[in-house]
Image (cartoon, rainbow, N blue to C red):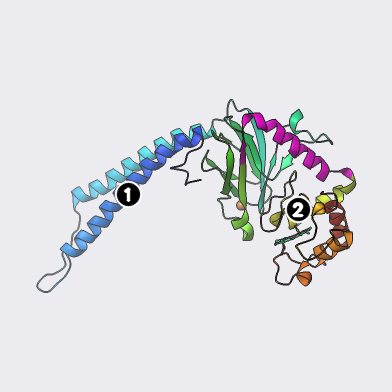
Amino acid sequence: MGPWPVDQRGPLVEQIAPLYWIMFAAAMVVFAIVAGALIYSGIRFRERPGHVAQQFHGHNLLELIWTVVPTLMVISFSILSWNKLNLVNDVSGAAMTIQVEARQWSWSYTYPDQDIFRLADGSPLKAGTLDIPVGQKIKLDLTSKDVIHSFFAPNMGGKKDAVPGHTNEMWIQADRPGTYVSHCTEFCGDGHADMLITIVVHPQTEYAAWAKTAVTDANRANSPETKAGRDAFLASACVGCHTVAGTAASGKVGPELTHIASKPNIAGVLSPVNEENLTKWVSNAPSIKPGIVMPKFQGVLSDQQIHDIVQWLLTLK
Ligand code: HEC
Ligand SMILES: [Cu+2]
């Protein structure tokens, strides 16, 4: 996918892009005039043998021009932006609302309380990617658990901050299926660079099938017997590095763990994938594979927590 101003994939960004180009062109014109005038006067009026550098004070016409012109520009940009902002804020008529929660350093999306998103325990589906159907207006309710983050869907919509204790509304709509990867756009700490936003746009006819798979994955990952392990996993650093489909874990640093229990080995070095080996790995991966970025969790998590996490991983077949 190209940069959003030249690769527009939805009605909202089609409205925003022309304004971007107007402002960009105006900025280029101002830059050319200012830089041109600077270079011209530097050469023309400089001090040189037989020439004293000229001094100017109180040139009324010039001062008038460089006060009035920028003022008019700022006023017109404000009016034009205000106009587009109204469009970004206009969430009326959305087909559905998805709750978006940011935390250091991942996003989680809670789908509406509707039958197709309902898990076995009655709660709505919560996932680490934003999956939407093509051609529909989707409202997003943005909030944050810790610090201020910013949600940006460049090729199909606007950008808004996710602020703790507050809900911001925006909407997105895509007119072509595909996977769109964007990024948190508010510096939010160490892991900011890894805080990706993944939006998957499904063809209308395949959306229900996606929801069904996602709910099945989530039910499996959500089983009451292994809930303690799942909760411990989701509350620890694991989520920042690993993805488990059907949960809020969407890290991209390490391999996906959605089907870890069906793998032939752990990280290519420990086999089979059983309780003993997983416990060794999670407790102290660097001692097994030196130099690895996955830290040791012995002493960070309690033995009970590691045990619970391993029990849960074993159900991810
Ligand atoms: C800083 C990032 C990071 C964190 C935090 C982290 N991991 Fe990992 N993990 C990795 C990387 C990278 C690998 C791949 C290592 C390799 O193959 O060399 C890995 C591999 C694994 C594997 C083997 C995957 C496979 O496909 O073979 C498991 C299981 C695993 N991690 C579990 C966990 C658990 C459980 C936690 C939390 C307690 C955790 N990881 C935290 C980065 C991380
Ligand atoms: Cu962030």
Look at the image and tell me whether residue 125 can be seen: no
Q: Amino acid at mark 1?
A: Met
Mark with earlier residue (1, 2) = 1
How packed mark 1 is, by other alpha carbons closer than 10 Å (few <14, some 14-19, many 20 or more), is: few
Helix or strand or loop: what does disc 2 sit on? loop
Q: Is residue 165 magenta?
A: no
Which segment did they paint magenta?
200-224
Is the CB atom of the residue marked by disc 2 within 8 angstroms of ligand 1's nearest atom? yes
Q: Which residue extends farthest bottom?
A: 49
Q: Residue at x 74, y 66 (%)?
A: 295
Q: Say which residue label 1 marks.
A: 28
**Residue that carries the numbered disc 2 in the rendered image:** 257
Place of residue 234 in the rendered image (x, y in percent of width and height, measured from the top left): 77, 51
* Helix, strand or loop: magenta stretch: helix
Locate residue 100, reporting x and y percent.
66, 41
269 lies left or right of 22: right
* Quadrant of the image occupied by residue 21: top left
Distance CA(mark 1)–CA(mark 2): 48 Å
- Residue 85's label in the rendered image is none
Looking at the picture, tell me which residue is in the foreground, 252 or 193: 252
x, y percent for residue 288: 78, 70
Name, please, the residue furthest toward the front.
264
Residue found at x 76% / y 63%: 268
> From what the image shows, is residue 276 above or below residue 94?
below
Q: Is residue 141 visible?
A: yes
Q: Quarter of the image holding residue 44?
A: bottom left
At mark 1, the secondary structure is: helix
Q: Point out the frontmost of discs 1 and 2.
A: 2
